[in-house]
Image (spheres, grey):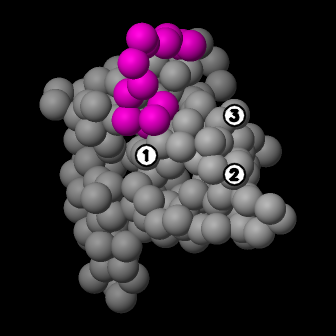
């Protein structure tokens, strides 16, 4: 089953960013460690910042539109060998073209195209469960945890699953 998500938070952690997606009709959060450039690109688009010349994600979105196509949705499809995988679904003349992409690039395009950000259930299931904070104290505690958390910390439980025969490892970074 595919779950609708939205961008919950984006934070710089050391030399990386952590993008946290929130399950819209459920309690789960999904952190994905991404590069600083991609995090900056997502943040600028969310804030509505425009530049005189197009940045890479703006350019790609413009090319898709200029070709008479539209980004329908993006789907984070799997987590395999500590790598998240995603697809960009592009519609042109009633046909759907599916393009393999990194989740960070996919989300950067999704926020520009104002389209759905979806996550396959198997991705949520492959990760240690992380639930949405409810109270202000929980939100504050969650933000503090994110500041000190590394991909290795979050995916530590995947090592246990790996030993039991499931896939996954210690980093959970996208590639």
- Residue sitting farthest toward the front: 67
The mark nearer the N terminus, 2 or 3, is 2
Quadrant where the image shows the C terminus: bottom left
Identify the element where label 2 is drawn: loop
Foreground residue among 126 and 3: 3
Total labels: the figure holds 3
Q: Is residue 137 above or below residue 87?
A: above
Q: Compute the Cα span from label 2 to label 1.
A: 18 Å
Q: Quadrant of residue 46?
A: top right
- Residue sitting farthest toward the bottom: 165
Q: Is residue 47 left or right of residue 44?
A: right
- Tell me if label 2 and label 1 are in contact, CB under 8 Å: no
Residue at the location (36% across, 88% down)? 165
Q: Position of residue 59 (x, y in %)?
A: 45, 35
Identify the element where label 1 is drawn: helix
Q: Is residue 4 left or right of residue 163?
A: right
**50 drawn magenta:** yes
- Residue sitting farthest toward the left: 15
Mark 1 = which residue?
Answer: 105
Mark 3 = which residue?
Answer: 114
- Neighbor class of circle 3 (other Cα within 10 Å; few <14, some 14-19, many 20+) is few
Mark 2 = which residue?
Answer: 69
Q: Compute the Cα span from label 2 to label 3.
A: 14 Å
- Neighbor class of circle 2 (other Cα within 10 Å; few <14, some 14-19, many 20+) is some
Q: Is residue 131 above or below residue 36?
A: below
Q: Which residues are magenta?
A: 47-59
Looking at the image, can residue 124 be seen? no
The mark nearer the N terminus, 1 or 3, is 1
Identify the element where label 3 is drawn: loop
Please name which of the two marks, 2 or 1, marks the residue nearer to the observer. Answer: 2
């Amino acid at each position: 089953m595919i779950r609708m998500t939205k961008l919950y938070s984006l934070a710089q952690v050391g030399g990386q960013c952590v993008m946290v997606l929130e399950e819209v009709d459920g309690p789960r959060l999904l952190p994905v460690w991404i590069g600083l450039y991609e995090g900056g690109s997502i943040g600028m688009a969310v804030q509505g910042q425009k530049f005189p010349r197009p940045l890479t994600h703006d350019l790609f979105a413009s090319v898709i539109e200029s070709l008479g196509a539209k980004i329908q949705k993006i789907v984070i499809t799997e987590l395999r060998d500590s790598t998240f995988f995603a697809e960009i679904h592009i519609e042109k003349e009633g046909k759907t073209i599916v393009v393999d992409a990194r989740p960070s690039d996919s989300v950067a395009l999704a926020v520009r195209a104002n389209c759905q950000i979806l996550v396959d259930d198997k991705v949520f299931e492959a990760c240690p469960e992380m639930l949405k904070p409810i109270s202000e104290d929980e939100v504050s505690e969650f933000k503090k945890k994110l500041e000190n958390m590394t991909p290795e910390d979050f995916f530590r439980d995947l090592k246990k699953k790996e030993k039991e025969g499931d896939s996954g490892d210690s980093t959970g970074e996208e590639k």
